[in-house]
Image: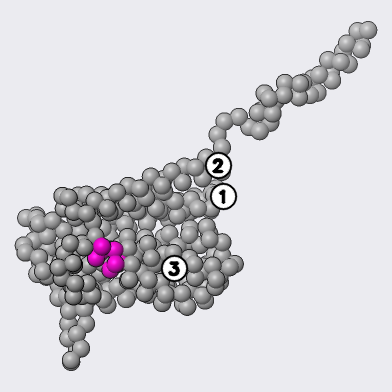
């Protein structure tokens, strides 16, 4: 397939295709989160006022992280630090700055929503937006492909020579699969009275594993600082997320002896109960 145009003109104005795609993605995230909050009986008007700050913080963080990871290149080409239209946005950077900005703003504008509850509500929104953003962002961006390939599904990307793995499409498919799992976890938690924080914990675990797989198999370049950092961060998120999920489930649904059994073992005299009283009555009758 030929490269998708990364920019188009409307009179004297130049628009970048991936920019439009990211704008659609941000609007989708805003709409989906508002809808989930409304469905769960929480105020949602504050999301509109918060979205602008989150978008700005996410874009700054995404670009800053990319520049830091490729500092060797940008030191010699400082003018290109601001040339976002040539690609170069880090998902981790966007999350590192965008997510805390959203939660901090929510604490001021929506105190009725507990932070853990908000995290569980946000988890599917982030996954769905990430998947959509892969298709409408990097897929339409300059140099958006992965490793070179001769496979039939290889695609041509602007700024890259030859067919490339359509990594954004792979990423979107894998993330949508994780989203289906998270929806099931959410239903399970609602049906069984699962602990708060379970949804976000499982989501973080799977997304971390997802990012490690993507970077290791399709995007990584040996010795590249940014690639190594993403893989390490992905594994860290995987262990932290799944570890938190296991801890929450163990605390909510403890396994082992019941409380009454544990008390009986700890205090044998308490296990006599009615039987002890009956034994005393029998001894009195014999006497």
Q: Which mark is residue 246?
A: none
To which residue does mark 1 refer? 193
Q: Which residue corresponds to the image point at 19% horizontal and 85% vertical from the top-left?
A: 14
Report which quarter residue 125 is drawn in.
Answer: bottom left
> Relative to the observer, which residue lies in front, 191 or 241?
241
> Relative to the observer, which residue lies in front, 70 or 135?
70
Badge 2 density bin: few <14, some 14–19, many ≥20, Cα 10 Å: few
SS class, disc 2: helix
Q: Which residues are magenta?
A: 62-68
Q: Nearer the viewer, mark 1 or mark 3?
A: 3
Residue 107, percent from left and from top:
54, 67
Q: Which residue corresponds to the image point at 87% horizontal and 13% vertical from the top-left?
A: 282
Magenta stretch mostly in which secondary structure?
helix
Q: Which mark is residue 251?
A: 2
Lateral position of residue 92 relative to residue 75, left or right? right
To which residue does mark 3 refer? 101
Q: Outermost residue toward the bottom? A: 11
- How is colour applied across the structure in the image? one colour
């Amino acid at each position: 397939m030929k490269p998708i145009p990364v920019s188009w003109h409307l009179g004297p104005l130049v628009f970048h295709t991936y920019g439009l795609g990211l704008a659609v993605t941000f609007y989708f995230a805003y709409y989906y989160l508002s809808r989930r909050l409304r469905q769960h009986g929480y105020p949602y008007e504050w999301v509109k006022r918060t979205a602008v700050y989150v978008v700005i913080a996410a874009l700054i963080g995404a670009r800053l992280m990319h520049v830091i990871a490729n500092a060797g290149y940008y030191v010699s080409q400082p003018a290109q630090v601001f040339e976002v239209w040539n690609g170069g946005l880090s998902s981790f950077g966007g999350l590192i700055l965008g997510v805390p900005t959203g939660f901090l703003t929510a604490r001021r504008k929506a105190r009725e929503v507990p932070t853990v509850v908000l995290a569980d509500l946000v988890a599917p929104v982030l996954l769905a937006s990430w998947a959509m953003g892969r298709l409408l962002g990097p897929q339409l961006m300059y140099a958006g492909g992965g490793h070179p390939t001769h496979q039939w599904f290889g695609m041509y990307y602007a700024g890259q020579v030859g067919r490339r793995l359509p990594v954004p499409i792979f990423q979107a498919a894998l993330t949508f699969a994780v989203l289906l799992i998270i929806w099931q976890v959410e239903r399970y938690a609602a049906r069984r009275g699962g602990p708060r924080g379970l949804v976000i914990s499982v989501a973080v675990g799977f997304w971390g594993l997802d990012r490690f797989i993507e970077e290791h198999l399709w995007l990584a370049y040996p010795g590249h600082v940014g690639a190594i950092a993403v893989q390490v961060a992905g594994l860290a998120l995987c262990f932290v997320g799944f570890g938190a999920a296991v801890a929450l489930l163990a605390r909510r649904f403890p396994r082992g002896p019941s409380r009454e059994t544990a008390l009986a073992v700890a205090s044998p005299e308490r296990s006599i109960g009615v039987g002890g009283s009956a034994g005393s009555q029998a001894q009195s009758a014999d006497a």
